[in-house]
Amino acid sequence: MKRQGIFLLICIIIASIAFGLCAYVVDETKQVVVTRFEKVVRTETKPGLKWKLPAPIEIAIYYPRNLQNWDGKKEEIPTLEKRYIYVDAFARWKIVEPNVFFKTVRYIDTAKSRLSEIINAEVRNVITDHRLIEAVRMSSRIMDIEAGISKKEDAGQEKYAIKTGREKITQMILDRSIPQISELGIELVDVKIKRINYVEKVRQSVYDRMIEERKQMAEKLRSEGQGEAKIIRGNKEKKLKEISSGAYKAAQEIKGKADAKATEIYAKAYGVDPEFYSFIKTLEIYNETLDENSSVVLSTDSEFLKYLKGYTGKNK
């Protein structure tokens, strides 16, 4: 019984090893190339448990089925007008023919290296055939930052109509790269330009020019604002003067009406007893013109002293 148990254990171990050497699993994100002595015998793309001859007779090589990323390095490229710029591109690709992929490049890193050679070359070829503005913009529409430039200032500047644009340039790079890359069993899904920038030796001068242009626009806006402020202040002063003159006119009219009303009241009051009114007014004149140091020489018939005649009190 002991020998039978050992024999059974050995059989299980051998079966496990054989299963491990002959079975392999394909999941949804993988595809497999089965080679026999370095030659492709079949490919497996459907998920599930698969069988092969034990290694090293047959070997299962796994490749991804999902999209892969290619990120290029920025390169110094001259445009059509000989402006040197850095262009940084990226792409998405996937393996669609694993047997062809195995025969041509075999490894993912090798495939990325070939992609770099092909895509970078096409990026350079397309960029050098077009002007910088074509690679930067997609249309000739006026941007928000350009809307502040007046027609007078803009009239003397050269207008360039976008003929190709960035979108078509990336499509040209894609179309030129696809035939070369498809020979590797790879489908190039998309190519995009991630960044475009001037080289370092001209970047600072471009920044300085941009700063100077912004300063000029700021000064223009500042002067326009000051002009508008003067107009507003002038209108304010004019309005204040109109309000002040209107208020003065209204005050004078009210004052005139009040004086007229007071005169009317005084006239009615004094009209009741004219003699008393004459007496009060004469006393007011005495108070204003005569004091202890005054000397007046008048005849006794003077109308001015008629209320002092017969006065026997103490002289003031």
Image (spheres, rainbow, N blue to C red):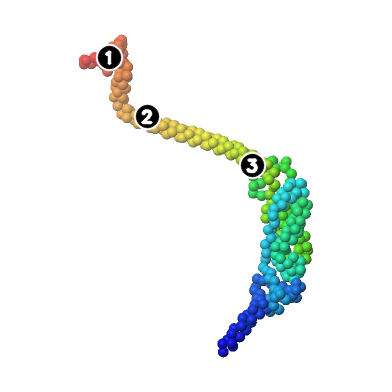
Dot 2 crowding, Cα within 10 Å, few <14, some 14–19, many 20+: few
Dot 1 crowding, Cα within 10 Å, few <14, some 14–19, many 20+: few
Q: Amino acid at mark 3?
A: Ile
> Seen in the image, is 255 located left or right of residue 100?
left
Which tag, 1 or 2, sits closer to the chain's start?
2
- Which is more foreground, mark 1 or mark 3? 3
Please give the count of numbered marks on the rendered protein: 3
> Seen in the image, is 289 located left or right of residue 121?
left
Q: In the structure shown, which secondary structural element does the residue marked by tag 1 occupy?
A: loop
Q: In the structure shown, which secondary structural element does the residue marked by tag 3 occupy?
A: helix
The N terminus: image quadrant? bottom right
Which tag, 3 or 2, sits closer to the chain's start?
3
Q: Which quadrant of the figure has residue 193?
A: bottom right
Which tag, 1 or 3, sits closer to the chain's start?
3
Q: Which residue is mark 3?
A: 211
x, y percentage for residue 67?
A: 67, 66
Q: Amino acid at mark 2?
A: Thr
Q: Which quadrant of the figure has residue 167?
A: bottom right
Q: Which residue is mark 1?
A: 292
> Seen in the image, is 277 located left or right of residue 20?
left
Asked whether the viewer can see residue 49, the reply is no
Asked whether the viewer can see residue 216, the reply is yes
The C terminus: image quadrant? top left
Q: Which residue is mark 2?
A: 263
Instruction: Give me the C-alpha separation between circle 1 and circle 2.
Output: 33 Å
x, y percentage for residue 25?
A: 65, 76
C-beta proximity under 8 Å, tags 1 and 3: no
Instruction: Work out whether 266 lies above or below 98.
Output: above
Q: Residue at 42% of width from left, 31% of height from top?
A: 256
